[in-house]
Amino acid sequence: MSKNDVIIHAKNLTRKFKMGNVDVIPLKNVSFDIQKGSFTTIIGPSGSGKSTLLNLLGLVDSPTSGELYINGLKVHEQSDHQLTKLRAKYIGFIFQSFHLIPVLNVLDNVMLQLSFSDLPKSDHKEAAIDALEQVGLGDKLRNYPNDLSGGQRQRVSIARAIAKKPEIILADEPTGSLDSKTGEGIISIIEELHKLGKTIIMVTHDLDIAARAETQLVLRDGEIRETRTKDQKELMKVY
Ligand SMILES: Nc1ncnc2c1ncn2[C@@H]1O[C@H](COP(=O)(O)OP(=O)(O)OP(=O)(O)O)[C@@H](O)[C@H]1O
Ligand SMILES: [Mg+2]
């Protein structure tokens, strides 16, 4: 693959928090490339820095030091306004606890996210309905989040993430609040998005789910301790 296929380039990313007099460093000099259209999972014990890393990649937090490039654009050189635009264009984020707005119906939850995108306002409704149909919720547009099951709520949050057609989908333990059968439905949708060409980066505690990705990043104490690829695993089975 040529260098042009790299959609995320992270170089020596470090995130430090000050807690009184103590420095907490959940992420230490992390470097990696993510290929466009690839499927990567991030695993590691609780507190190893997975969410901290995903928040940096999702442009909702900034590194203390290091460099992050998205599609060749150096992220920390952008203004806040440009960052918001970059996030709206490239990033769809899926959270463990859905983060839906309870007073808005399903359609309005998805449309609200589109108000930050470049898409003309006249296209928002159609794009939101398309996304909700894609996750099998075309018949729930007027329902409120509290009317829905956990799996349905997570599908709304996937629709919200994909409605603006971002190239990158980030998911932080998207099945963490769901039973395994419902979770499997969510992973199938995410795998389908990968097949459609999206770049997927997903944090998970489920090692079987993690192993379905092309690449696994193993985090421990804020560092990438291991990078596993599917090819390597298949090789290991042969030898
Ligand atoms: N805003 C913050 N201020 C201070 N410390 C923080 C902050 N965010 C994260 N941390 C610390 O950084 C470390 C890594 O946290 P992070 O949430 O990235 O872990 P994680 O791997 O996602 O864990 P989990 O599997 O439990 O979700 C933890 O020790 C956490 O307390
Ligand atoms: Mg986390």
Image (cartoon, helix red, strand yellow):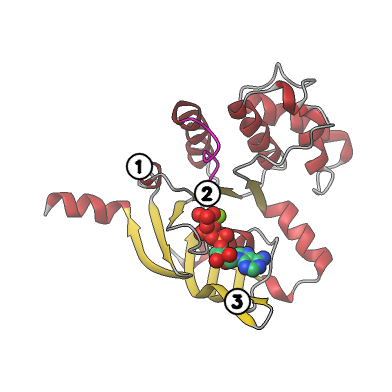
Residue 180, quarter of the rendered image: top left
- Residue at 67% x, 42% y: name it: 161
Q: Is residue 213 visible?
A: yes
- Residue at 44% x, 48% y: name it: 205
Say if 214 sits above or below 178 in the image: below
Spatial separation of the CA atoms under disc 3 and disc 2: 20 Å
What is the secondary structure assignment of the residue under circle 1?
Answer: helix
- Residue at 72% x, 56% y: name it: 87
Closer-to-camera residue (111/199)? 111
Main SS, magenta region, reads: loop
| Residue type indicated by callout 2 | Ile
* Circle number at residue 179: none
Residue that sits furthest to the right in the current view = 122
Answer few, some or many: residues within 10 Å of disc 1's Cα (few below 14, many 20 plus, some between 14 and 19): few
Residue stretch rendered in magenta on the structure: 173-179
Answer few, some or many: residues within 10 Å of disc 2's Cα (few below 14, many 20 plus, some between 14 and 19): many
Residue ID for mark 1: 208
| Residue type indicated by callout 3 | Glu
Q: Would residue 207 appear left or right of 62 to someone viewing this image?
A: left
Spatial separation of the CA atoms under disc 1 and disc 2: 17 Å
Residue 6, given in percent of the width and then of the height, sits at: 51, 63
Residue that sits furthest to the left in the current view = 239
* Circle number at residue 200: 2
| Residue type indicated by callout 1 | Asp
Residue that sits furthest to the front in the current view = 20
Residue ID for mark 3: 67
Closer-to-camera residue (169/103)? 103
